[in-house]
């Protein structure tokens, strides 16, 4: 039954044959990312494993290379994204036995060395394939397919956000059962289909209710996706006031736009994840500063406030996490102590392999802490400072580009979208200090990064000048 994972790939081919590449993106790939779990895979013999979303993006990527690549404009971010995917593959290829200096034996007639080489090369190739389907191709989709196109006379950017919001609202509606019962509807349903695959994502309970994870594996990862949908939903309500204003049921004041916003917000709350909530709070702080100051002054003020708040949080957190987990008086304190112990446990391992790390498959679990709940520490351990540095360049570079765009005069819709991108980026980066970036969040993140690079808002002055010039020439003719 694992072969059903190929259904999104078949559906994508059918849409590409009868429609457009953007329709395949909206109607096939996006649902595969937001509605189907990523932890069930189809593993063809001698081939990398495929999840639903990875199967869907392969035909989309082929079509994109064939029809859209001519519109590609090289940017520095393209290089950083490619190097980030290559660095992950290199970290995997250089991990395990080769990292201990045994690579010298590869130049001898030693069969053991040949086995080691084959093992590492296979791991590296599989990791690059994963990087292709979850990093490079989503980045290209975001850069090429969201801006500058239409579906049914509606800009793709609006269709994309409409679909995202309503699908996340559906996820939230289904997850009400999970919230009340502490179980996972997705694992219960798909577990029957993929009965031979074990899932190591137990459902968590907090404050007496289930922490919903939807198809995103973990509550914090789900919170990050709902956070993304929330800010784009707020942008859509301002950019498209007529969207979803019709009542869903006659006689009831329920509209599509109202249900969408309520669903996404309820989903974020039901994850009961403090990291995404903190990310939302910081993003709203930036929004408040932008309303008071210019964009550049708001950015500087935000960085200063972030440094002050971070220093205060460090002092308070240091006292809060000084003891052991056995001495914790609450689940929140126990979780905070665990994250502090992660830094202490993994620092020696990071120092041992500072360049490319230990690889994602075979990194040792320091003090039994296999779950590294910090994306930046996770990168330092598995990809070394090379991988972590590239990731920071991608995130910070995207933030700088957004600030530069926001400082330009542009149409209100474009400006609000730039602010929405900023809010999402801040929210995700804040949350990543409490969890690793996994499952569908990787694709959502690089889709966002590509979208930011694909934006090129027209300056308002250029539009005004284009309309005034013909009037001037017309008056000269009359005179």
Image (spheres, rainbow, N blue to C red):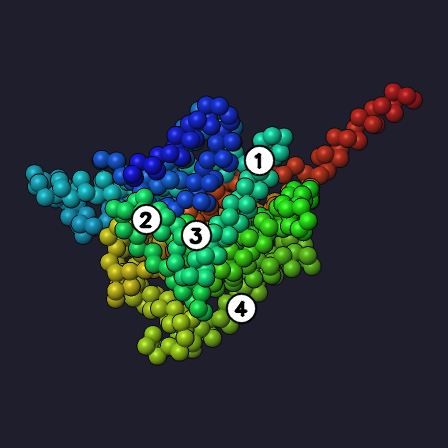
Residue indicated by mark 4: 309
Labels 2 & 4 near each other (Cβ < 8 A): no
Percent x, y for residue 332?
Answer: 42, 71
Secondary structure beneath label 3: helix
Compared across the picture, whether 18 is left or right of 295 comes to left
Q: Real-space Cα distance between discs 3 and 1?
A: 26 Å
Please state which of the two labelled residues, at mark 4 or mark 3, is closer to the viewer: 3
Residue sitting at x 79%, y 28%: 469
Going from N to C along the chain, the mark reached first, 4 or 1, is: 1
Q: Nearer the viewer, residue 39 or 312?
A: 39
Residue indicated by mark 2: 191
Q: Real-space Cα distance between discs 3 and 2?
A: 14 Å
Residue indicated by mark 3: 214
Q: Real-space Cα distance between discs 2 and 4?
A: 44 Å
Percent x, y for residue 262?
Answer: 58, 54
What's the mark number on residue 156?
Answer: 1
Going from N to C along the chain, the mark reached first, 3 or 1, is: 1
Q: Is residue 276 above or below residue 82?
A: below
């Amino acid at each position: 039954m694992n072969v059903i994972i190929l259904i999104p790939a078949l559906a994508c081919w059918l849409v590409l044959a009868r429609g457009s590449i953007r329709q395949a993106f909206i109607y096939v790939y996006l649902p595969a990312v937001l509605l189907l779990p990523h932890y069930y895979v189809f593993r063809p013999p001698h081939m990398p494993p495929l999840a639903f979303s990875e199967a869907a993006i392969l035909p989309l990527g082929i079509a994109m290379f064939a029809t859209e690549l001519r519109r590609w404009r090289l940017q520095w971010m393209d290089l950083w994204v490619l190097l980030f995917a290559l660095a992950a593959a290199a970290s995997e290829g250089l991990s395990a036995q080769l990292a201990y200096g045994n690579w010298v034996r590869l130049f001898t007639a030693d069969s053991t060395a040949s086995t080691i080489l084959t093992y590492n090369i296979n791991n590296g190739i599989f990791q690059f394939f994963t990087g292709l389907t979850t990093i490079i191709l989503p980045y290209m989709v975001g850069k090429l397919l969201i801006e500058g196109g239409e579906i049914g006379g509606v800009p793709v950017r609006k269709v994309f956000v409409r679909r995202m919001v309503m699908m996340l609202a559906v996820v939230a509606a289904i997850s009400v059962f999970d919230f009340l019962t502490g179980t996972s509807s997705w694992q219960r349903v798909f577990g029957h289909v993929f009965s031979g695959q074990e899932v190591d994502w137990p459902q968590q309970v907090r404050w007496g209710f289930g922490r919903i994870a939807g198809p995103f594996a973990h509550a914090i990862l789900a919170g990050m996706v709902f956070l993304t949908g929330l800010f784009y939903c707020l942008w859509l309500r301002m950019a498209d006031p007529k969207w979803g204003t019709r009542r869903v049921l006659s006689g009831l004041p329920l509209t599509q736009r109202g249900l969408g916003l309520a669903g996404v917000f309820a989903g974020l709350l039901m994850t009961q994840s403090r990291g995404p909530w903190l990310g939302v709070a910081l993003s709203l702080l930036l929004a408040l500063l932008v309303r008071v100051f210019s964009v550049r002054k708001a950015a500087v003020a935000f960085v200063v406030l972030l440094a002050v708040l971070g220093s205060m949080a460090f002092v308070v957190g240091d006292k809060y996490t000084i003891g052991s987990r056995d001495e914790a008086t609450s689940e929140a304190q126990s979780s905070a102590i665990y994250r502090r112990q992660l830094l202490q446990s993994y620092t020696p391992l990071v120092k041992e392999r500072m360049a490319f790390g230990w690889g994602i498959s075979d990194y040792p679990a320091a003090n039994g802490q296999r779950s590294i709940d910090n994306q930046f520490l996770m990168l330092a351990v598995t990809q070394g400072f090379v991988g972590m540095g590239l990731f920071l360049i991608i995130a910070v570079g995207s933030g700088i580009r957004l600030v530069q765009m926001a400082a330009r005069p542009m149409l209100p819709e474009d400006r609000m979208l730039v602010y929405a991108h900023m809010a999402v980026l801040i929210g995700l980066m804040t949350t990543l200090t409490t969890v690793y970036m996994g499952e569908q969040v990787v694709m959502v993140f690089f889709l966002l990064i590509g979208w930011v690079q694909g934006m090129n808002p027209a300056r308002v002055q250029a539009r005004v000048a284009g309309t005034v010039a013909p009037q001037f020439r017309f008056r000269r003719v009359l005179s």
